[in-house]
Image: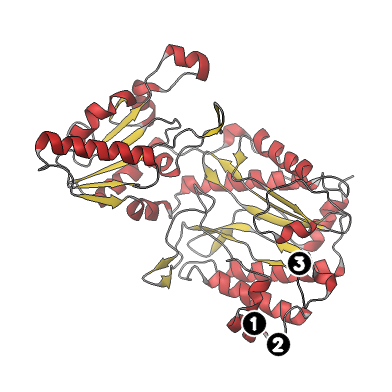
Amino acid sequence: MNAPLERSAVPAIAGEEFARRRRQLMQMAGEDAVLLVAAAPERTRNADATWPYRQDSDFHYLAGFPEPDAVLALLPGRLHGEVVLFCRERDAEQARWHGRSIGTERAVADFGLDDAFPIDDIDDILPGMIEGRARVYCHFGREPAFDAQLLGWMRRLRQLRGGGVVPKEFVALGHLLHDLRLYKSRAELKLMRAAAAIAGEAHLAAWRHVRPGRYEYEVEAELLHALRSRGAVPAFTPIVAAGTNACVMHYQHNRARLDDGDLLLIDAGAELDCYASDISRTIPINGRYSREQRALYEVVLAAQLAAIDEVRPGQPFDAAHHAAVRVLAEGLCALGLLRGDADTAIAEGSYQRYFPSKTGHWLGLDVHDVGDYRIDGASRVLEPGMVVTVEPGIYVPPDEAGVDERWRGIGIRIEDDVAVTRDGNEVLSAAVPKEAEAIEALLAGRG
């Protein structure tokens, strides 16, 4: 196993890249537009306790600013500065309880913004900046509190000016911004490689603690320890699914016992500076796959390898899914779980009894990242810089009628993160073994 990634070695997004993103977006919107993006609010967990704060992905993509109570305004062509941030002012009393805020001066100096104002003054300042613009680009409908505030600014402008200079059009910001986010830069890919490396190390660390008699939450604890000790956080709540729990697609209870003879499906990813990885492996708890487990595992692995081969420039996004479905259907028919041939299973959709999901999704700042999957009704064509997951599986429900009992309750998923390159693809998570022999060899060395 590689040495743990040093936190100081983690690549960062340079300020110039954030500036370039803002320039691209403003150029796409035009000089008669204003673009408004609100930071994610703090979320209450219970009473006065909040969830760990995580910045809104779009806000982070454009500003890299990590605090709540902030609004970014992009004002193309504004002479006094096109990029304006409203944020918390520094407050000594607040700092005693919650730590020091960045403040307006550091926001400008450290984040490359043109100007910054206290968030408490936004009602007095921002409406005047909006005045005269034809369109407002925003995420209307995402945060009710911000929506109400924005509508209040519009009402104020109409009352003061008779409505003559109030923007007449509200446009969904995602239409422009999410297409930009779909193409990862070199710096973003470096971060995603690092996130995949950390997640891979966490998977391998967790495997060393997999034994009959232990519990799913003990394995989850090893995953979380490995992620946090390397400067990352979980990209999502880890799935640690033993035995029949692996047949639940989004299982998250993580409370069950690990039993001898069962499989353990682990789906876990690291988030590093807001960029995600997403990796799944399915391993035998006692260190050896049974005959039936091995047979299904080899079908899933073959399907995944066939799907990864379809991740390359010029191929439609859904080509990987179709390749995986073909291999899965052939394998399920050959093993007797499906009757007839693969063509019939695909045409009738009977394979979906054991593979009800798609084969992958976009990956980036969000685990299920933004970006259209279809353009004008056709599957989107892959281009360099896009990153996808490839995650076929077979899930035989424990109560599945009409199938031999020896197959029931087996759930298997193999998932990797794959970047589209100029010449083909790069599997970002390739360091995590997935061949059955390699997994068994690693598990044999658990001690």
- Tell me if residue 16 can be seen: no
Which mark identifies residue 375? none
Q: Say if 393 sits above or below 227 in the image.
A: below
Residue 360 left/right relative to 183: right
Task: Give the mark, 1 or 2, whose residue is nearer the N terminus.
Answer: 2
Which mark identifies residue 345? 1
Instruction: Evaluate if marks 1 and 2 touch, with contact meaning CB atoms under 8 Å apart.
Output: yes
- Tell me if residue 430 can be seen: yes
| Residue named by callout 3 | 297
Q: Say if 81 sits above or below 443 in the image.
A: above
Mark 3 residue type = Tyr
Q: Nearer the viewer, residue 80 or 409?
A: 409
Mark 1 residue type = Ala
Which residue is painted at 65% across and 43% down in the image?
A: 198
Local secondary structure at mark 3:
helix
Which residue is painted at 57% across and 70% down in the image?
A: 321
Instruction: Evaluate if marks 3 and 2 touch, with contact meaning CB atoms under 8 Å apart.
Output: no
Image coordinates of residue 350 in percent, x first then y, are 65, 78
Q: Say if 443 sits above or below 352 in the image.
A: above
Image coordinates of residue 6 in percent, x first then y, are 63, 34
Image quadrant of residue 56?
top left
